């Protein structure tokens, strides 16, 4: 009988990216090698994350909330492209996530995410990019 280490989702406010992505369900955050610490947290990140147009946007620093929805140009071309990619490939709308945060607050969004990405078989975390539980697959 094979045993699995259960990886439970550790979502907290600092793991919700300015674009509305929940970093705690990202394959970069969930992997064991070259693990990403999340968009808002200082530490090791893959090159594509450190070069992200959104996290490095000068307008983002001027927002009160730290989220793209507070920007005068929201939704910008980059956010529209990212949202389209996530809707088509991963069945998740980042613009929808941002609307949820704006309307209901970050705490409520984090609570709703915890149930959305919890594996019904083992209680582990389902990866947004693979749609598989990282604990029991």
Image: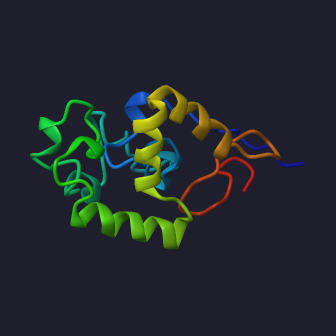
Identify the residue at horizontal 52%, vertical 47% (top origin). Answer: 30
Residue 87 shows in the view = yes
Direction from residue 125 to residue 54 in the image, left or right:
left
| Residue 88 in the image, given as x and y percentages of width and height | 50, 73
Residue displayed at 42% across by 70% down: 85
Residue 129 lies, in percent from the top left, at: 53, 61
- Which picture quadrant has residue 127? bottom right
Instruction: Look at the picture and state if 32 lies above or below 75.
Output: above
- 85, 37: nearer the viewer: 85
In the image shown, does 98 or 23 lie closer to the viewer? Answer: 98
- Using the rendered image of the protein, determine whether residue 22 is visible from the camera's viewpoint: no
Residue drawn at x 21%, y 30% is 64
Residue in view at x 24 percent, y 41 percent: 70
Percent x, y of residue 47:
25, 57
Quadrant containing the C terminus is bottom right
Residue 13 shown left or right of residue 41 in the figure: right
Indicate the quadrant where residue 5 lies: top right
- Between 61 and 120, which is closer to the camera in this rendering? 61
Direction left: furthest residue:
58
- In the image, is residue 104 above or below residue 69? above
């Amino acid at each position: 009988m094979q045993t699995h280490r259960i990886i439970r989702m550790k979502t907290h406010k600092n793991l919700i990216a300015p674009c509305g992505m929940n970093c705690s369900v990202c394959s970069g955050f969930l992997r064991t090698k070259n693990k990403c610490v999340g968009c808002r947290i200082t530490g090791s990140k893959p090159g594509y994350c450190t070069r992200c147009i959104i996290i490095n946007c000068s307008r983002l620093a001027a927002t009160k909330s730290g989220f793209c929805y507070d920007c005068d140009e929201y939704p910008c071309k980059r956010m529209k492209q990212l949202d389209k990619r996530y809707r088509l490939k991963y069945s998740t709308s980042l613009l929808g996530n941002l609307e949820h945060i704006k309307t209901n607050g970050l705490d409520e969004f984090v609570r709703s995410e915890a149930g959305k990405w919890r594996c019904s078989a083992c209680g582990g975390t389902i990866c947004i990019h693979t749609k598989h539980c990282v604990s029991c697959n």
